Image (cartoon, rainbow, N blue to C red):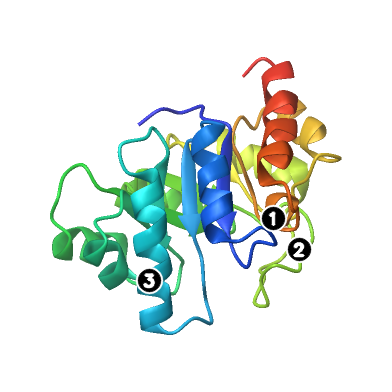
Amino acid sequence: MINSFGLYLILTNPAAGYESCAEAAVETGVAFLQLRMKSAGFDELLDTAGRLRNITLGSPTRFIINDNLEIAMEVDADGIHLGQDDLSVTEARARWNTAEKICGLSTHNLAQAQEAARLLPDYIGVGPVFATNTKMDTDPILGIEHTARIVQNVELPAFAIGGINEQNLPELLRAGIPNFCVVGAVNHSTDPAVAIRRLQTIWESNAF
C-alpha cells in the first residue's frame, strides 16, 4: 500500500452523474474512488456499484464501497471503507477473507487513529479538517494543525477529509499532509475531469 497517493475521491450525488465521474476518475488516474450513497436502497446501491465496478475494473483506480460489506463483496470491489460505528475492521476481514482487498477506516481524533494502528486497516481517513455540509453527522472540526499532527504520528497511510477544495488544499499540503479526500469539490462540478485535474495540479506542484 503506497503512503503518498494524493487525491481520494468520494462520489455522493455527483452533478455529472456517477458513471461520468467514475470515467473521469479512471481517465485522470485517481488512486481511490469511493461510492457513498447513504440514503440509497440496496437495489439502487447494487446497481450503481456494479456499473462503477465495470468502469474501474482493470484500471489503477481502486474502487471502494462505503460501509456496505455485502455490496462490496457482491460486485467484487477493491475494498471497503468503514466508519467508527460500522462493522469492525477485524469482522470485515473475517467475513471477506481475501488478502488483496483493502479495508479503510475513518478516524476523528488522535485516540481513534492510535487505536486504528492496532487494528491495522490499510489506510485511515482523518477529519473533518474543515466545516462540510456533505455529511449530516459530522464530528468536531480538527483544523489543519491538529489533522497534520494525527497524520504524522500514525504509521499508516492516511488522508485528510472534510471541506477540502482548491482554495484550502495548498495550505493543507504545506502542513505535510500528502493525501486528501474530496467530495463537493468534484461532485458539484459538471466537468469532473477538469475539477480533478485542478486538484491534481495543486498536489503535484507541492512536490509530493
Q: Earlier in the sequence, mark 2 or mark 1?
A: 2
Q: How many marks?
A: 3
Which residue lies at the image location 33% right of the left edge and 71% below the top edge? 87
SS class, disc 2: loop
Which residue is label 2 attached to? Answer: 132
Q: Quadrant of the N terminus?
A: top left
What is the CA distance from the residue labelled 2 to the residue labelled 1? 6 Å
Where is residue 18 drawn, in percent x and y? Answer: 55, 60
Picture disc at residue 47: 3
Residue at the limit of the structure toward the right, as seen here:
167
Answer with the quarter of the image where residue 45 lies: bottom left
Which residue is label 1 attached to? Answer: 162
Answer with the quarter of the image where residue 135 lies: bottom right
Which residue lies at the image location 74% right of the left edge and 60% below the top edge? 141
Q: Quadrant of the C terminus?
A: top right
Answer with the quarter of the image where residue 194 lies: top right
Amino acid type, mark 3: Asp
Amino acid type, mark 1: Gly
Q: Residues within 10 Å of mark 1 (few under 14, many from 20)?
A: many
Q: Is residue 71 left or right of residue 64?
A: left
Amino acid type, mark 2: Thr
Q: Residues within 10 Å of mark 2 (few under 14, many from 20)?
A: some
Residue 68 visible in the snapshot: yes
Picture disc at residue 20: none
Q: Residues within 10 Å of mark 3 (few under 14, many from 20)?
A: few
